[in-house]
Image (cartoon, grey):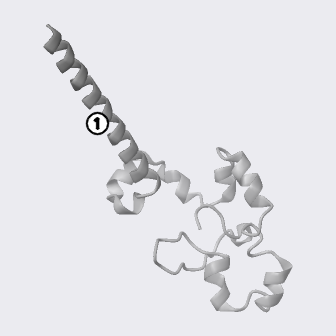
Amino acid sequence: MKSLTTRTYKLFVLSCVISIALILGLYWAINWGHHKLPKWILEAGRDTTITQKKSAKTCKNCHEKIFQAWKDGRHALAWTSETFIEDSENRSKEKCLPCHIPEVVLAGEKPDSRIENRDAGIFCFS
């Protein structure tokens, strides 16, 4: 009878270790390794309508504190700051636009400049 208890205990511990490893692996994959996952897996777990709304105010609905910190920072002013307007000769320097009003950035690529919602500067979807 004692060997059954020891065996059950070992099986329980092994199950716990495997479960924790799976949870940590999934957490890492979703938060830091998402660029290595197939697109269909990411889309299954995300609300794709959020990225179609491309506005910082969309983020504000769920992330109020982060939005407030962004709103008062340099990224929010990337397009509207007087310094940028002056240094870019009234926003006419094309080389400045991809960084100051970027479209959605993909890792390793230089972003295109955004046409709409430029006053938002650099925000979550940039």
Where in the figure is residue 81, as x and y percent of width and height? 82, 76
Which residue is the site of mark 1?
Answer: 18
Judge by depth and name the residue closer to the eye, 72 or 89.
72
Q: Which residue is at 67% across, 69% downward?
A: 122
Q: Residue furthest top?
A: 1
Image-based side of 6 in relation to 47, left or right: left
In the image, is residue 3 above or below residue 120? above
User: Residue 34 location, x and y as percent?
Assistant: 41, 58
Residue 74 on image: x %, y %: 76, 69
Above or below, 87 relative to 124: below
Q: Residues within 10 Å of mark 1 (few under 14, many from 20)?
A: few
- The residue at the point 77 percent across, 59 percent down is 71
The location of residue 48, given as percent across then percent down, is 47, 53
In the displayed structure, does residue 81 sit left or right of residue 97? right
The quadrant the C terminus occupies is bottom right
Q: Amino acid at mark 1?
A: Ile
